[in-house]
Amino acid sequence: MTDVNCSPLTTEQLARAAELAEEFLGGQSGAAALAASFARHPELTIALTIDGTVEGVAFGHPDVEGGAILEGITVDDAHTAHGLGSLLLVRFEQAAADAGCCDVSLGSGGGYVEHFYLKNGYRQTEYLIAIPDGDRQPLDLDGLEVLRERHWEPNYRVLNIAAPDGYSPPVKAALAQRLRMQASDVSCIFYKPVTRNR
Ligand SMILES: CC(C)(COP(=O)(O)OP(=O)(O)OC[C@H]1O[C@@H](n2cnc3c(N)ncnc32)[C@H](O)[C@@H]1OP(=O)(O)O)[C@@H](O)C(=O)NCCC(=O)NCCS
């Protein structure tokens, strides 16, 4: 019989969860990011276990506006597409609400990952654009408003751009096409309000 469970990550489970984060998320959301989230916000670090083995993890932290940022979520690819990622996401949302956060937001991977968030009730509020730091040429955003700009290690200028039409693959594709010589990534920021249900 299969026992599936989502609960806060324990210290004993950290190494296995870090392996998953590194293999399936990597970069800004890999093992180091998971360890940092777990150290600072263990209440927002949720493990998915199957028969006692960690097969997925979701982790994040509060933002400055009273919400929570989902830094990373992954399920071992031996177990994806069976609803377990959705289960883990719902458990993370509960943890965020229990921690007093009013919403969850995240920067999504492309392709089916966007479908994953949309089917779980998220809507797109912004685009995230990463530009190698040296590139200071004007950007052709076709009138889309720049909301925030910051620096990401090691060398990226990152802009949050308004998405007034919400999730729109044609608008995203046109934006990526216009910025193809400058941006290394154009991705969607998704958002969902959360409330305590107990
Ligand atoms: C995103 C992720 C956590 C979802 O976990 P999951 O257990 O597959 O989640 P669910 O089964 O609840 O939903 C996934 C949906 O995407 C679809 N899907 C999953 N993997 C897919 C793939 N490789 N190609 C196409 N569709 C896929 C599933 O069919 C499902 O949609 P459906 O319910 O309409 O059939 C998991 O796929 C994963 O770890 N991906 C790699 C890491 C990653 O990209 N994380 C997100 C960072 S923003």
Image (cartoon, grey):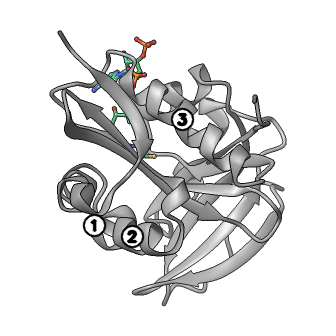
Which residue occupies the foreground of this view, 171 or 160? 160
Q: Secondary structure at mark 2?
A: helix
The quadrant of the picture occupied by the C terminus is top right
Amino acid, disc 1: Ala
Cα–Cα span, label 2 and label 1: 6 Å
Q: Are marks 2 and 1 in contact (CB under 8 Å)?
A: yes
Per the image, the residue denoted by label 3 is: 91
Instruction: Please tell me how crowded label 1 is: few (under 14), some (14-19), or many (20+) other residues with Cα within 10 Å.
Output: many
Seen at 41% across and 34% down, the residue is: 6
Q: Measured from the top left, where is residue 197 in percent x and y?
A: 76, 29
For residue 137, the mark is none
Vertical placement of residue 88 versus 163, above or below: above
Vertical placement of residue 16 versus 191, above or below: below
Q: Nearer the viewer, mark 2 or mark 3?
A: 3
Which residue occupies the foreground of this view, 80 or 194? 194
On the question of residue 114 being in view, the answer is: yes
Q: Secondary structure at mark 3?
A: helix
Per the image, the residue denoted by label 1 is: 31
Q: Measured from the top left, where is residue 17 in percent x and y?
A: 25, 53
Dot 2 or dot 3: first in sequence order is: 2
**Quarter-wise, where is residue 143 in the image?**
bottom right
Q: Are marks 2 and 3 in contact (CB under 8 Å)?
A: no
Dot 1 or dot 3: first in sequence order is: 1
Per the image, the residue denoted by label 2 is: 33
Q: Are marks 1 and 3 in contact (CB under 8 Å)?
A: no
